[in-house]
Image: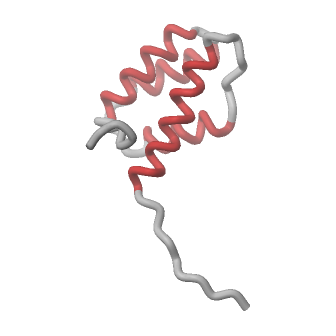
């Protein structure tokens, strides 16, 4: 039987992956790709669970449902503001 040590994934890496999914969805929506995937909704749920503000999430979800790219852009901006997102890929 295999026995391996448990490796914890740092929270910032999980957050970065979820943010990558949302950023990619916003980029791809401009090219008329249907970005409504389970990964996008999972990323929204992940961040919204820890946020007391909801307007950005509501706007993003409405943008997905009504296919409004400007709402996706603004929703993502607000989500980043709501959660105080720091991009660890570019910060020191």
Of all residues shown, which one is farthest toward the bottom?
Answer: 1
Q: Position of residue 24 (x, y in %)?
A: 57, 27
Query: Which residue is pictured at 61% across the width and 10% down the height?
Result: 30
The answer to whether residue 51 is above or below residue 34 is below
- When asked about the image quadrant of residue 92, the answer is top left
Q: Position of residue 47 (x, y in %)?
A: 44, 40
- When asked about the image quadrant of residue 56, the answer is top left
Q: Position of residue 79 (x, y in %)?
A: 39, 28
Of all residues shown, which one is farthest toward the left?
Answer: 92
The answer to whether residue 51 is above or below residue 73 is below
Q: How many marks?
A: 0
Query: Which residue is pictured at 50% across the width and 72% down the height?
Result: 7
The answer to whether residue 49 is above or below residue 55 is below
Q: Quadrant of the N terminus?
A: bottom right
Query: Which residue is pictured at 36% across the width and 22% down the height?
Result: 78
Query: Which residue is pictured at 50% across the width and 12% down the height?
Result: 71
Q: Nearer the viewer, residue 53 or 35?
A: 35
- When asked about the image quadrant of residue 37, the answer is top right
Q: How is the image coloured?
A: secondary structure
Q: Position of residue 16 (x, y in %)?
A: 45, 43
């Amino acid at each position: 039987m295999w026995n391996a040590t448990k490796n914890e994934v740092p929270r910032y890496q999980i957050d970065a992956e979820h943010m990558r999914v949302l950023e990619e969805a916003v980029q791809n929506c401009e090219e008329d790709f249907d970005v409504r995937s389970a990964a996008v909704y999972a990323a929204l749920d992940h961040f919204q669970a820890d946020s007391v503000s909801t307007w950005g999430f509501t706007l993003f979800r409405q943008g997905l449902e009504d296919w409004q790219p400007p709402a996706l852009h603004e929703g993502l901006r607000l989500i980043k503001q709501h959660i105080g997102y720091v991009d660890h890929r570019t910060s020191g």
